[in-house]
Amino acid sequence: MREVKKSIPKKDSYGLIRGLPVYTDDLAPKDSLVMKVLRSPHAFARIKNIDTSEAEKMKGVHLVLTYKNVPRRVITRAGQGFPEPSPYDKFILDEYVRYVGDEVAAVVADNERIAEEALKKIKVEYEVLEPVLDFEKAEGHPSIIHPEKESFSQFNIGRDPKKNIAASYQMEIGDVDKLIKECEEDPDCVLVRERFYTQAQAHVMLEPHASYAYIDMAGRLVVVSSTQTPFHVRRQVAMVLDIPIKNVRVIKPRIGGGFGGKQALHGELLVSYAAWKLKKPVKLVYTRREVFEATYTRHPMRFDVTLGAKKDGTLKVIDFNVLSDTGAYGEHALTVLMVAGSKTLPLYNKVDGVRFRGKVVYTNHVPAGAYRGYGAIQGNFALESAMDILAEKLGMDPVELRLKNVIREGETSEIFKIMGEGREGVEMIIKSCKLEEAINRAAELAQWKKKRSKREKRESKARGIGFAVAMQGSGIANIDMGSAIIKLNDDGSFNLLVGATDLGTGSDTILAQIAAEAIGVSSDDIVVYSSDTDLTPFDTGAYASSTTYVSGNAVRLAGEKMRKLILKEGALKLGVSENEVEFDGRVIKTKEGSKSITLKELATILYYTENQKQLVADGSFVGPESPPPYAAAFAEVEVDTETGKVDVLKYTIVLDIGTPINPNLARIQAEGGVVQGIGMTLFEDVKYSKDGKLLTNNLMYYKVPSRLDVPELVVEFTESYEPTGPFGAKSVAEIGIDTPPAAIANAIYNAVGVRIKSLPITPEKVFFEMNK
Amino acid sequence: MKINLKINGVWKEVEIDPSDYLLDVLRREGYLSVKKGCDTGTCGACTVLRDGYPILSCATLAATCDGHEITTAEGIADEMEDYAKMLAGEGAEQCGFCSPGLMVMLYALKKEIENGKVKKTKEDIRRYLIGNLCRCTGYAGQERAIFRYLGVE
C-alpha cells in the first residue's frame, strides 16, 4: 500500500487555513436578499391571528411568508434516504408552533437591518397552550403536540401521535423475563438493575447553518448550503416546491463542521421557496442563537438496564428499556433509539437472552436529531456503567469481565439481523475485530493494573481510573449508497467526482488516496470535486460513519476500472495484448520491457491525435453489511473532594478502525470525538426554563470544551484489516465519542466511590452524592 | 459615517453605520477570512489585530477603529506559511472555520513571546489561545503544530 495508510495534508488545507472565501456565506452573491425568521416565543401555541401588513409595506421588504401563504405540505427535514424512517410531521410553516424557536414567519428584505425591523412589525396573536416539558410525562399528556391529520410515516415506526409517541420499537432474543427470574433465584448468579439518564447536547459546529438559493440561466433553482446531505436536500426541495428534481441543483461548498447537525434541512426550504417565488437570490444565515434554539440537539434518554451474570462473570442476559425525547418533531426518533441498542448490545454477543424496548416521545423542546454517536453514546453510558457495577458486584476486574464477554472476530450477534436503522438489519459475521487486542494495549498504555490497585489521594484530591469499550457501524447496510466517477485528463492526472460530503473531516482527501491506490498513481495526481448534484454522482451523504466505507468502496471500484482502462489503451497503443502490459503508476510497458509509453504521453495521444476518446470509469457501492469499528478506553480522573469538581487527567483510547487510510486525519477524528464526549460527560447541557425557553442559547451559557479542558490524549490504532472495506478500512467518525461518559463515570466511582448515573456529571452532583 | 482604516497595510475610506461592528464591515469590504461563529464574543473566529494587538471584531464597533491599523488573516498568511504547513501536516485545520482567527491569535502570541510578554511554555501558550474555540480537533492536533512552530518542547 503506497497511497493509503499515509498521512498527507488535506486537499483543501491551503484555502482553509489562509481564510479564502470558501463557505456558504462567503460565496453568496453580494446582491442576495436577506431572509430572517420570526420565531415562536412560546413552547406550544396556536397562531390565532397574524398580521404582516405593516412589515409588507416597508421599503426594502420583498416577501413575508407565513403558514397562510406557503403550501401546506407535510414533510420531514431529517435528511435521510427515501423512504425515510422519520415521520412526516413538519410543515414549511404551520399555524401551530411547538417549541420556543419554531418558525412563525419569514421576511425577505434588501438587507439584514430591514429584515430585522420588519420582523418586529409582524403582529402575532397566540393562543398559548400547555406545553409538554417533562419527557417522562409526555406519553398520554393532555396536550397533544401533533394533532394534525396530515402527518404520517412512510412505514410502521410505532408512532401514536395521540399519545405523543413519535416512534417505538421492541425486539427480544430468548425469553428475557424468564432468564432474569432464573438469575434472581440462582445463588450462583448476580443481577444489576439500574436507571441512567443522558442529556441533550448541542453540536456547536463553528460555522452556523447557512444557505442561499438563486435561479440559474436555465431558470432552474440552485441551492448552496452548508449541508451534510446535498442529494436529500435536492429531493426535499423539489418535493416542497412541487417541481421536478431535474430543476434543482444543490451545491455544498466547504462547510464549517456538522457532527450530524447539518444532516437535516434547516434554512434550505425557506430560502428555496423565497428564491423560487421572487426569482432573486435569497440567503439565510443562522445566528448562533438560532443554531441553539432552532436546529437540533442530541436526544436525551432514560435507560432502565438489567444485566444478569454467572458468578464466574459469564454474562447471561441484558435488558434495555429506553425512553427518548425527540422534542417537537420526530426527526431521527426511531433510528437514534434503535442505535442505542443495535450499536451497543452486540458487544456482548454470547448472552442467552437480550431485549431492547423503547418509546420516543414528542415534547415541546428543541427537536432532537442526528448527532455524532447517534444513540450509541447514550446506550454506551448505560451499558458500560452497568457493566462496571456488575464487575464490582462480582468482585471481578472490569477489564477481565469485558475480556470474558466481548465479541470476537469470526463471531456474530443475532442483533445484526434483527435491528437495522428503522427496519430489519442484515446478518453479519464479524470479519475484523481487534477489540481484545485494543483492550489489552489500552490497559498497558494507561497502566490500568498499577493505577487501579494504588489509588492516589492527597489532601482534597482523589484520583481514579475507569474503563469502557464501544462499537459503532460503517454506514447503514443495504441503504447508504455512494458513487464515484474518475476521468483521465490529457496530462495524465485525474478528476475524482464524488457525491460524498466533506464536512471538514478530510473525506475528499482520503477518497483521493483510495482512488490513487486503486489506479496505482500518486494522490497528488487526483483532483477532487465533491457534493454538487449536477456534476457529481449520487451519494446519500455524510452520516452514520459511512463515507470511508461506503463512498470509499465506490471510489475503489471506480479506480480499479480506471486502471484496467489504462492497461487496455496502453496495450492497444503498444500493439500488444492487455495481459502483456503492466503499469507502474507512471509508465505502461510490456512485461519483457521492450516497449513502453508514459501515462502522460498516452493521455495526450488519446485526447489529441489517435484513436481519440475520454477515459472515464465509475463505481457505486451499497454496504452489504456495516462492519463495526471498536474502541477500548481508559479515563484517569482527579476529583476534588471538597467541591466535587472532576478533572480528566489522561484519556487513553485504542481503536480498531481497520486500515486508517490517513492516520493523521483518523487520529484527529478520534481526538476530536473524545473531547466532544468529555464535554458531554462533564458539563455540556441544553437547559430550559420552567416555561420551555432555552437558557443555554449562546456560547457563554452553553460551555463547550476549551483547550484547557483537554487531558493528555493517548490515541492508538490496532493493526486490523476489514476485508469488505476499501483497502481494509472501516469507519472512524463516531467511534471516538462513545466511550468518555461511561469511562469517566467509572473512573469517578473508582476515585471517590460515588456513582453518577445522569449526565452531565457536574461538580454539584458529585458533591451531593459524596455528602449523602 | 465615513471612517479610515488601514487594512492589511492599505488605507481605505469606508462607509459605515455608527452601530456597525468591525466584523460586518470587514466582511462587507471583502475580508472574508474574518468569520462569524457566535454573537457573543466567545468563539474567537472573528479575531483580527488592531495596531498589532488581537481584538474580537464581532465585539468592536467599527467606528472606534477610525484611524487604526487592522490586520486580518489575509494580511499575514504569507508570513505564516510555515505554520500553515505544520497545521496542515497534522490534518488539524479540519473544517477550517476557526483556522484564520487562530492564525491571527498565534501571530500576536509569537510577537508577545518575542517581546518577553508571554512565557514560552505550553501552559502559557494554551492560556493565551484559550479564546479560540475549535469543535473538530479536540485541540491536540492544533497544539502539536503550534508547539512545533513556536519551538516548544
Image (spheres, rainbow, N blue to C red):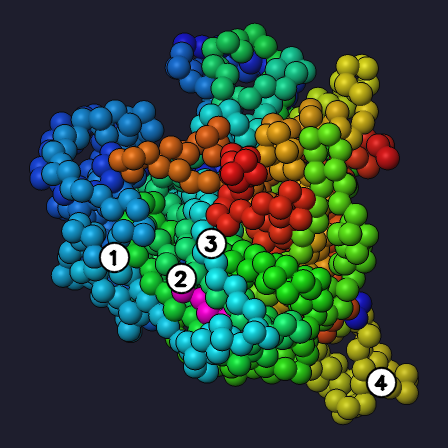
- Say which amino acid is labelled 2: Val
Whether callout 3 and callout 4 share a subunit is answered yes
* Residue A184 is at least partly visible in this image: yes
Query: On the image, numbered disc 3 is attached to which residue?
Result: A196
Query: On the image, numbered disc 1 is attached to which residue?
Result: A139
Judging from the image, what secondary structure is the residue with disc 2 in?
Answer: strand
Q: Which residues are magenta?
A: A317-322
- Say which amino acid is labelled 1: Glu
Task: Give the quarter of the image for residue B5.
Answer: top right
Q: Residue at x 80, y 85 (%)?
A: A581
Circle 2 chain = A
A505 left or right, relative to A703 = right
Circle 3 chain = A
Label 1 vs 3, first from the N-terminus: 1
A181 left or right, relative to B86 = left
Label 3 vs 4, first from the N-terminus: 3
Label 1 vs 4, first from the N-terminus: 1
Q: CA distance from mark 2 to mark 3?
A: 10 Å
- Say which amino acid is labelled 4: Thr
Query: On the image, numbered disc 2 is attached to which residue?
Result: A322
Q: Which tag is nearer the camera, tag 1 or tag 4?
A: 1
- Say which amino acid is labelled 3: Phe
Label 4 vs 2, first from the N-terminus: 2
Query: On the image, numbered disc 4 is attached to which residue?
Result: A590
